Amino acid sequence: AVQLRLNQTISGKTAQTGSFVALSVINPIVINGETLIQAGAQAEGQVSSAKKAGIIGSPGSVGIAVTTVTAVDGTKIPIQGMAAQDGEDKMVMSLIIGLLCIFGFLQKGGEGNLDSNLVINARTLSNADVN
């Protein structure tokens, strides 16, 4: 298991699917007394989904998938971890206000955001040789 911290805030409003995501390892990975992955080591991922909030209160969303972490020797180790967040659904409120006032239909839902410093738990996908 590898605990990671997201290095930047990601929003469904601005993110694009496939974009690079930077993460950092929180705790070192030590096996049999040897450090294989240092705390602070870089991990990478991609935006797996991104949707802007829409009118009539429809929520936005964003998701990321973690793909690799860098070992002490520079080897990229495949890992798997995910995080996703949906924004606030304001459709009902928008429809009620819209019936009273046409501008209610223009109300947007909440944006989906993954905040920096979010902790993501990931796992290695297979054994890896690290020198």
Image: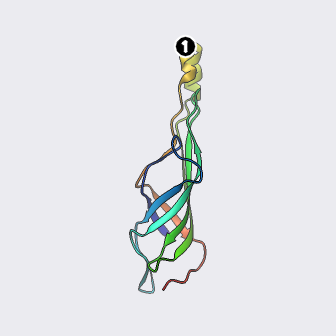
**Residue drawn at the location 53% of the way across and 73% of the way down:** 76
Depth order, front residue of 27/14: 14
Depth order, front residue of 124/41: 41
As shown in the figure, which amino acid type bears the numbered disc 1? Cys
**Residue drawn at the location 45% of the way across and 86% of the way down:** 32
Q: Is residue 92 above or below residue 32?
A: above
Q: Is residue 25 above or below residue 13?
A: below
Q: Is residue 6 left or right of residue 106?
A: left
Residue 1 in view, yes or no: no
Residue 36 in view, yes or no: yes
Q: Is residue 42 above or below residue 18?
A: below
Q: Is residue 13 above or below residue 115?
A: above
**Residue drawn at the location 54% of the way across and 32% of the way down:** 109
**Residue drawn at the location 56% of the way across and 13% of the way down:** 100
> Are there few (<14), some (14-19), or many (20+) residues within 10 Å of tag 1?
few
Question: Percent position (x, y) of residue 92?
Answer: 59, 26
Question: Percent position (x, y) of residue 1?
Answer: 51, 71
Instruction: Find disc 1 in the rendering and name its residue.
Output: 101
**SS for tag 1?**
loop
Depth order, front residue of 5/97: 5
Question: Percent position (x, y) of residue 72?
Answer: 44, 78
Find residue 81 and report its image quarter. bottom right
